């Protein structure tokens, strides 16, 4: 007998596009108006599914700098799953990249 394996497909409460809009809104409101979310991926942390996006400093005169960090969006509720330490680290990394440019 062959062993059959079953893979479960998680259906998120919000899709990639919706999660990226939430991540971009949070980045603009919390980190800076020239920061945007890059491509996202769906991952699992414990029992929670998250959309994870890398964050980049953008500008009209240059390609995006970074990533300066990552933003996690709860795939079921759409809530941003970030702490203050991570926020401050992203702000510091973004400022450092902007000064170096």
Image (cartoon, rainbow, N blue to C red):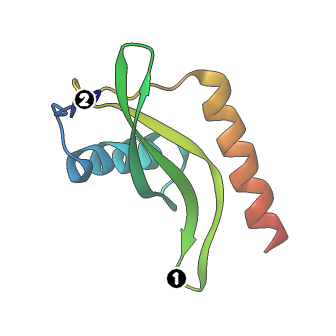
Asked where in the image residue 57 lies, by quadrant, the reply is: bottom right
Side (left or right) of 72 relative to 6: right
Q: Is label 1 in a helix, a strand or a loop? A: loop
Which is more toward the observer, 31 or 16? 16
Whether residues under marks 1 and 2 lie with C-beta atoms below 8 angstroms apart, the answer is no
Asked where in the image residue 73 lies, by quadrant, the reply is: top left
Q: Residue furthest right?
A: 100
Q: Is label 2 in a helix, a strand or a loop? A: loop
Image x and y of residue 44, in percent? 41, 27
The residue shown at (36%, 18%) is 48
The residue shown at (28%, 29%) is 5
**Figure check: 53 above or below 96:** above
Image x and y of residue 87, in percent? 61, 33
Callout 1: few (<14), some (14-19), or many (20+) C-alpha neighbours within 10 Å? few
Q: Please state, as top left, top right, bottom left or bottom right, where the N terminus lies in the image.
A: top left
Which is more toward the observer, 88 or 43? 43
Image x and y of residue 38, in percent? 46, 60
Image x and y of residue 66, in percent? 66, 61
Side (left or right) of 6 relative to 64: left
Q: Please state, as top left, top right, bottom left or bottom right, where the C terminus lies in the image.
A: bottom right
The residue shown at (22%, 29%) is 8
**Mark 1 / mark 2, whichever is N-terminal:** 2
Q: Residue furthest bottom?
A: 61
Callout 2: few (<14), some (14-19), or many (20+) C-alpha neighbours within 10 Å? few
* Residue that badge 1 annotates: 60
Of badges 1 and 2, nearer the viewer stands: 2
Which is more toward the observer, 40 or 55? 40
**Figure check: 37 above or below 25:** below
* Residue that badge 2 annotates: 4
Which is more toward the observer, 17 or 58? 17
């Amino acid at each position: 007998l062959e062993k059959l394996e079953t893979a479960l497909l998680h259906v998120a409460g919000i899709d990639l596009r919706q999660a990226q809009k939430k991540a971009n809104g949070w980045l603009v409101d919390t980190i800076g108006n020239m920061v945007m979310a890059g491509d996202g991926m769906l991952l699992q942390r414990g029992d929670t599914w998250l959309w994870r996006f890398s964050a980049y400093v953008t500008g009209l005169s240059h390609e995006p700098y970074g990533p300066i960090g990552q933003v996690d969006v709860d795939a079921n509720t759409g809530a941003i799953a970030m702490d203050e330490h991570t926020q401050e680290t992203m702000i510091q990394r973004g400022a450092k990249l902007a000064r170096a440019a």
